[in-house]
Image (spheres, rainbow, N blue to C red):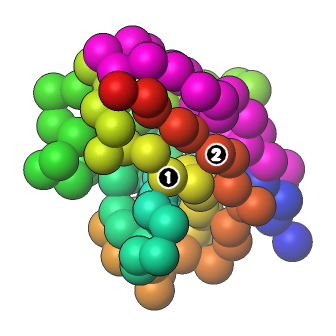
Amino acid sequence: QVLLVESGGGLVQAGGSLRLSCAASGRTFSAYGMAWFRQCAGKEREFVAAISGSGGSTFYADSVKGRFTIARDNAKNTVLLQMNSLKPEDTAVYYCAARGFGVGTTEAVYNHWGQGTQVTVSS
């Protein structure tokens, strides 16, 4: 029912910045908890960042704290992930996820997923 489309991935040099965007369908976007997850090649998908429906609460994985920022624009049904000081270890497919009524930091609580966007950080 909720369609999520990620954009903004690409190839960047270590130390550079990139901004990912997730455009969501739906009439009650402001009620959705939103999150970003990533999956490195050959590894399990892992949590990156999350934000509550109002934007009042944010959560980050320890590996990205101080470098990544999650934000949302409910008027545009969009969630952003600003990634600064990128490292080769950040290379992964990044996925946007949505969950009605609440927010969390695990995959199990999210009901809708985008198809992902590739981020590659060169050294």
- Secondary element under disc 1, as helix, strand or loop, is strand
The residue beneath circle 2 is 118
Say few, some or many: other residues with alpha carbon within 10 Å of mark 2 (under 14 / 14 to 19 / 20 or more).
some
**Residue 11 in sight here:** yes
The extreme top residue here reads 16
Viewer-proximal residue, 108 or 99?
108
Tell me the residue at 53%/37% (across/down): 120
Viewer-proximal residue, 96 or 14?
14
Question: Mark 2: which amino acid?
Answer: Gln
Residues drawn in magenta: 5-27
Question: Measured from the top left, where is residue 119 in percent x and y?
Answer: 56, 39
Above-or-below relation of 110 to 118: below
The residue beneath circle 1 is 92
Tell me the residue at 24%/48% (across/down): 60
The mark that comes first in sequence, 2 or 1, is 1
Q: Are marks 2 and 1 in contact (CB under 8 Å)?
A: yes
Q: Which labelled disc corresponds to residue 62?
A: none
The CA distance from mark 2 to mark 1 is 6 Å
Task: Quadrant for the N terminus, please.
Answer: bottom right
Question: Mark 1: which amino acid?
Answer: Ala
Tell me the residue at 68%/67% (across/down): 113
Q: Is residue 16 magenta?
A: yes
Question: Measured from the top left, where is residue 109 in percent x and y?
Answer: 46, 81
